[in-house]
Image (spheres, helix red, strand yellow):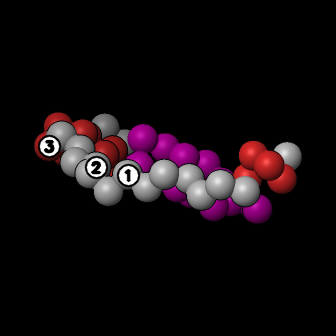
Amino acid sequence: MAKIYSHASPKHNNLSPKDETIRFLLNYSKALSVIDYNKLKFEALLN
């Protein structure tokens, strides 16, 4: 296993997501609501 992890992973600096992807993630994060109740977490997607 040490042999596998001894090499540095390649860096990808040319990431450029589509505008559609960014818009989707922003809209999803706006609609997501996380509710904490007695050490439990509930996720609700509010459309």
SS under mark 2: loop
Q: Which mark is residue 12?
A: 1
Query: Would residue 28 appear left or right of 11 to someone viewing this image?
Result: left
List the residue tagged with mark 3: 19
Q: Position of residue 19 (x, y in %)?
A: 14, 43
Of residues 39 and 5, the one nearer the viewer is: 5
SS under mark 1: loop
**Quadrant in which residue 46 is drawn:** top left
Q: Earlier in the sequence, mark 3 or mark 1?
A: 1
Measured in 3D between alpha carbons, the distance from the residue under mark 3 to the one under mark 1, in whole angstroms, is 19 Å
List the residue tagged with mark 2: 15
User: Do the residues under discs 2 and 1 have CB atoms within 8 angstroms?
Assistant: yes
Q: Position of residue 13 (x, y in %)?
A: 32, 56
Quarter the C terminus occupies: top left
Q: Dot 1, crowdedness within 10 Å: few (<14), some or many (≥20)?
A: few
Mark 2 belongs to which amino acid? Leu
Query: Would residue 16 appear left or right of 1 to someone viewing this image?
Result: left
Measured in 3D between alpha carbons, the distance from the residue under mark 3 to the one under mark 2, in whole angstroms, is 13 Å
User: Of circles 3 and 1, which is in front?
Assistant: 1
Measured in 3D between alpha carbons, the distance from the residue under mark 2 to the one under mark 1, in whole angstroms, is 7 Å
Q: Residue at x 24, y 39 (%)?
A: 21
Mark 3 belongs to which amino acid? Asp
Query: Would residue 7 appear left or right of 4 to someone viewing this image?
Result: left
Q: Dot 2, crowdedness within 10 Å: few (<14), some or many (≥20)?
A: few
**Magenta part of the chain:** 30-45
